[in-house]
Structure formats: C-alpha cells, structure tokens
Image: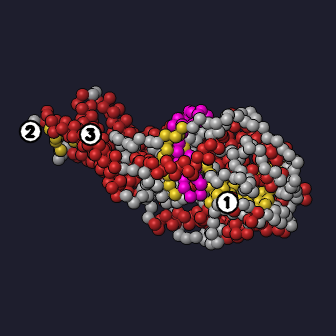
C-alpha cells in the first residue's frame, strides 16, 4: 500500500472529540425551551455539519503539521489544539448554565480589575484550593493532551484508518458546501425571534445566514447629567427598615417555604408583578438605593459626588440616622463606597459580617439580624432611623443550619453543577434553596416579633425585596446573571407604609412595580409630595400618572449593561444597544425578541410585532431616552 498519498487518521483521538462537539451542541439545542421541531432540525443539521467541518479541518492540519513541522513545533501545535478543544468542552457547560461562551467570559474578565476578579471568584462560592486545582489542570492540559494524542496514535496505528488525499480534499470541499446549501435553503424559513436563543448552542456560535435584525433609533439618549436633589420638610418620622435578600424569586414565597413573609405579603402591600433592576447583584443594588436605571451605575461611580444622590444621603440630609447590617460582600465592584460613601461616611453605625470558613452564610445572616433586633430595642432608635439589611444565605450554595433541613432530599454542592440534571436531582437542588430561604424567613419572623414587642410595628416603614431571582433550568440556565428570564428577574417587593392599605394605591399601579420605584415611593410617603421629574427614574406607587412599564438590565461585568428588557405587565421586549461604547449617544437599539409574561416568544410577523411594540412601549422609550438633554 502506497502511504505517501494517504492520510492516516488518529480516529481514537478525533472521534471522541467529534462526538462531544455534536452531542453537546445537540443537547443544548434540544433543551432550548420552544416547541418548533423544524427550527430545532435546522440547528441540529447545522451542528452536525459544523462539527464535521471543524474536525475534518483539524485532522488535515494535524496530518500536514506532523509531516512538515519540526517535532518541537508540532508538539506546540498539539498543546494549543488541546487547549482550544478544551475551551469547547468548557463552553458547553457555560452556555448551558450561564448563556455565556468561554470567549465572552474572557472578554468580561478582560475589563475587570484584579480586586473585582477576586470578588467574582468569591461570589462563585468555590474554595481557593479548588480554583488553584483548576488552574493547575489548565497548565497541565497541553502535556496531558500530547501524551493522550500519542497514546491514541500508537493504538490507532495497529488498525490504521487511511483515506486518500483526493478523497479527503473532496470531503473538505463538500462539507462547507453542504453547510452553505443547507443555510441557503432553510435559514430564511426560521423566525427571526428564534435565532437569538438557539445559535449560541452551535459549535461556531452562529449560522452562515441570519435574518436581518430590526433596528430602533431615537433622537434622544440616556441622560448624562446629574441633577441635584432638593429636600423638603419631613412629614413622617417613622423608622424605615429595608431588607435586600440575595437571589430570592417571588414564586418561592409560599406558605410552606416562607410562612412569615407569605403572611407579611398578604397583610401588607404587594403587587401582581415585581421586577428587579437587573439579573445581577450590583446593578440591582444601584437601582434600589438610587432609584435609577442600572445604565448609570458606572457614571455615578466615577463621579466624586455620585454617592450624594443615594438613599442614605437623602436620609442623612433630613436628619435620619442610617444603620447598616450586611452579610453580603459589599466590596463587589466597589459598591460599598458608591452606595454608602467613602469609608461608609453616610452610615451612622455600619455592621459587617464577613464570610469565613468558621462563619457560613447562615451564621452571618443570623448575626446580622440579631444585631438589628438589638439595635431596634434601644430607646434612641425609636424614630428617624433607617435600618438597611443585606441577607445572603439564599446565594448558592445555599446555607442554613444543619439541624434545620426541612426540605429533603438534598443534592451535594458539586452535583448542582450538572448541566442536564434529572427531575429528581433538580428538586434536590431546589430543596437546598428552600431550606435557605426558610431559614431567612425564620430570622425575618424574629424581627417582626421584636418590632411588635417594642410597639414599633404599627407605624413602621418596611420594604422587603431581593436583588434578583434564581433560575433552575426553567429556560435552560442555572442560578442568575445569565439571561433576563422571568425567574431571574421576578422578585418579591413588599411594602409596609405605616397603616397604609392597598386601596390607597391607584388600581393601575397595583399591577407592576420595579426596583427603581422603591425610592420615589419612600420619598413620597416621608415628604408627602411627589419627587421632581428628573430626581428618580422610577415613580411613586401613589402617583396616579405613573407609567406602566418596568426595565431590567442584563449583567455585563464591570461595564454598564447594554442589553435590557421593557415590560408592561403583559409583554416583554428584549433589546440591546448596537454599541456598548455609545450608551450616552442618540439611542440605536437592536431588537432581539418579544415575549409574553412567562417568556413564550411571540412569533407574529415583523409588521405585527412592530405595531405591538409601538403601541405598548413608545412612551417608555420616550421616558428612557428623552429628546431634551
């Protein structure tokens, strides 16, 4: 046999790689939440042809380099190849859980400061030892990959698979041609709204042809000025208690999971739909404590007077003392200084409860709530005080005392990272979450009991909310900070405003509320007048002219968010800025999709969708992007 004109294929190495590429892409496509089989078939064939094309090219390049490169350079090529193939393995898990490709992840990290990067690692709740082990494995991968390749080649040579050069060239020609023809014939039949959630599952993260995106342009832009706030005469002196709970979604507030907050919700002010300012922590904190859309957080952070527009500053100017109890890591993206001033200068008495191996999250939350209850009992704290409490037990890996496991069975911490868990395993992950939020509920119950014992409950102003929700694969992802799904953005938002009853709120304002509405509502209640037009982006729940829409922005690392949705209580419009570097220029947006309240995608014609968007969201765009700057 003349081997000179044959290509010897290391099938024991490349066949598993091909199978993984194909299976991982196919699994992601099949698990995308929509019922149209023809759409999934289009993307499955794309996944097959892309995987075959990629592996065929790699096989030929490997054969060519092995024949023509010096041994050291060929081994270098193999090491790089192994790393690149490994990124596709990691990519499967990231796409499945976080809707994030590995290169998007690297792009996030590129813009992070070292301290922010460390905070991100801590937020994952993975030990430093584990991160070091992962780093060691990454450095060892090229060597291990080379050894694995050579071992497979040795075994494959015993039963060689040989293909003629001409046949292989024909294959390299036919595969891309087939991909081109498939896309030419079928890409135009797929609804544009279905491309965005599906194409990230492909090996190449895109198709050859895509539907042209619909662009929205406005003469106005985001406000770039910082208007000063005025503080009228204070009319109320009641204590204010603000609770910001980590990763808490509204539909888990049930009589079984959280009986105290469920009762609080029934007795006090709640809303049909409450939405967070973002699907991530720092953006939502900003919206809550500034009453502003999350686009502005970086601008305020860079401004030396930025913190002088926050809620604690407003209270400080009116004679309130603000007390802080935080089990959360406020250093995240420098939020402590942005929210509470340099060296927490806006806080009368700060209390921090750091996460340590000896102090799990549930212990930190208990210490924070005990400190709060002790301070509530002090005679000097009976009026004109604001108590802000951050609770963290409901953040993954979900924390509660070992003796309080009410919901069983429980998953292990590592099993939570399974990309395709069974229904039984998924319920065991949710049980961890239920135990954590039940623990927080017990702590909240103790707080309410303390207020009533001190005869402070009747006139108290209490706000209970969460920074964002939590997803458990309802739309193909896990935890939060991935996509703007209903589960990641639908949060509890309950008010107790003294003896105010729900019938005091205009009926239309009982449907929809968001984080940016908290601060204007408190302002209205405490001062008995509506805030000025430019003071906040949100509006008071008592304002009869309140606009009926909410905005929530997607996590974008240390940069301002550029993808967001508008929601009117029935429909959700997902858009993004065409350029991340032009947020404060005349707005140019790219339409992504329109969906209903539960994220079912609207598959009407583009003409009908445009008509629907204009009808529902035109006034919202005019408010967000005012033409008078």
Judging by the rendered image, the residue that carries numbered circle 3 is 176
Judging by the rendered image, the residue that carries numbered circle 2 is 1
Judging by the rendered image, the residue that carries numbered circle 1 is 508
Label 3 SS: helix
- Locate residue 78, reporting x and y percent: 33, 36
Determine crowd level at label 3: few under 14, some 14-19, many 20+ residues with C-alpha closer than 10 A: some
Q: Residue at x 81, y 65 (%)?
A: 499
Q: Residue at x 86, y 46 (%)?
A: 232
Relative vertical location of residue 194 with respect to residue 273 in this rendering, above or below = above
**Is residue 565 magenta-colored?**
yes
Determine crowd level at label 2: few under 14, some 14-19, many 20+ residues with C-alpha closer than 10 A: few
Residue 210 appears in which quarter of the rendering?
Answer: top left
- The residues colored magenta run 564-588
Indicate which label's residue lies in the foreground, 1 or 3. 1
The quadrant of the image that shows the N terminus is top left
Left or right? Give the position of 233 relative to 521.
right
Cα distance between the residues tagged 1 and 2: 83 Å
Relative vertical location of residue 137 with respect to residue 246 in this rendering, above or below = above
**Is residue 267 magenta-colored?**
no
Q: Residue at x 73, y 69 (%)?
A: 267
Determine crowd level at label 1: few under 14, some 14-19, many 20+ residues with C-alpha closer than 10 A: few
Indicate which label's residue lies in the foreground, 1 or 2. 1
Of residue 270 and residue 448, the one placed in the foreground of this image is 270
Cα distance between the residues tagged 2 and 3: 30 Å
Residue 491 in sight from this viewpoint: no
Contact (Cβ within 8 Å) of mark 2 with mark 3: no
Label 1 SS: helix
N-terminal-most mark, 2 or 3: 2
The residue furthest left is 1
- Locate residue 567, reporting x and y percent: 58, 53
- Locate residue 88, reporting x and y percent: 39, 44
Residue 452 in sight from this viewpoint: yes
């Amino acid at each position: 046999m003349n081997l000179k004109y044959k290509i010897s294929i290391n099938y024991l190495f490349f066949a598993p790689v091909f199978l993984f590429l194909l299976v991982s892409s196919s699994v992601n496509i099949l698990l995308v939440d929509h019922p149209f089989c023809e759409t999934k078939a289009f993307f499955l064939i794309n996944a097959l042809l892309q995987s075959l094309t990629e592996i065929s090219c790699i096989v030929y390049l490997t054969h060519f380099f092995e024949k023509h490169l010096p041994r050291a350079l060929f081994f270098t090529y193999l090491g790089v190849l192994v790393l690149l193939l490994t990124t596709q393995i990691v990519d499967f898990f990231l796409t499945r859980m976080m809707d994030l490709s590995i290169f998007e992840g690297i792009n996030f990290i590129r813009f992070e400061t070292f301290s922010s990067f460390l905070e991100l690692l801590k937020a994952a709740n993975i030990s430093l030892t584990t991160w070091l082990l992962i780093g060691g494995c990454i450095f060892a991968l090229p060597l291990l990959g080379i050894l694995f390749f050579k071992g497979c080649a040795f075994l494959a040579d015993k039963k060689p698979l040989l293909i003629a050069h001409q046949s292989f060239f024909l294959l390299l020609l036919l595969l891309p041609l087939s991909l081109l023809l498939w896309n030419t014939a079928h890409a135009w039949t797929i609804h544009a709204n279905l491309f965005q959630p599906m194409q990230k599952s492909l090996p190449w993260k895109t198709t050859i042809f895509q539907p042209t995106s619909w662009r929205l342009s406005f003469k106005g832009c985001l406000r770039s000025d910082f208007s000063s706030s005025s503080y009228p005469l204070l009319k109320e002196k009641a204590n204010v208690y603000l609770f910001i709970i980590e990763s808490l979604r509204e539909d888990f507030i049930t009589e079984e999971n959280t009986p105290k907050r469920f009762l609080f919700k029934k007795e006090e002010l709640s809303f049909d739909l409450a939405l967070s300012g973002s699907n991530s922590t720092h953006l939502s904190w900003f919206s809550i404590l500034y009453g502003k859309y999350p686009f502005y957080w970086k601008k305020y952070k860079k401004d030396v007077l930025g913190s002088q527009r926050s809620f604690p500053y407003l209270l400080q100017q009116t004679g309130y003392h603000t007390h802080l109890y935080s089990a959360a890591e406020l250093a995240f993206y420098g939020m402590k200084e942005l929210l509470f001033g340099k060296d927490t200068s806006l806080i009368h008495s700060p209390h921090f409860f750091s996460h340590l191996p000896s102090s799990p999250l549930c212990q930190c939350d208990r210490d924070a709530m005990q400190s709060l209850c002790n301070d509530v009992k002090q005679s000097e704290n009976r009026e004109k005080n604001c108590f802000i409490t951050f609770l963290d037990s409901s953040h993954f890996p979900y924390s509660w005392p070992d003796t309080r496991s009410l919901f069983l069975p429980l998953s292990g911490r590592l099993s939570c990272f399974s990309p395709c868990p069974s229904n039984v395993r998924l319920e065991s992950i949710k049980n961890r979450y239920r135990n954590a939020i039940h623990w927080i509920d017990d702590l909240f119950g103790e707080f309410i009991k303390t207020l009533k014992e001190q005869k402070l409950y009747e006139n108290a102003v209490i706000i209970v909310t969460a920074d964002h929700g939590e997803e458990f694969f309802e739309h193909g992802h896990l935890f939060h900070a991935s996509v703007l799904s209903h589960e990641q953005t639908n949060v509890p938002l309950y008010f107790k405003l003294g003896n105010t009853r729900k019938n005091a709120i205009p009926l239309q304002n009982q449907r929809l509320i968001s984080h940016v509405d908290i601060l204007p509502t408190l302002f209205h209640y405490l001062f008995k007048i509506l805030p000025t037009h430019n003071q906040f982006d949100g509006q008071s729940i008592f304002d009869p002219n309140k606009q009926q829409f909410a905005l929530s922005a997607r996590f974008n690392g240390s940069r301002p968010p550029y993808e967001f949705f508008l929601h009117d209580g029935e429909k959700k419009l997902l858009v993004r800025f065409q350029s991340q570097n032009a947020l404060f220029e005349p707005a140019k947006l790219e339409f992504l999709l329109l969906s209903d309240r539960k994220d079912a995608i609207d598959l009407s014609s583009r003409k009908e969708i445009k008509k629907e968007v204009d009808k529902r969201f035109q006034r919202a765009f005019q408010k967000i992007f005012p033409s008078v700057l």
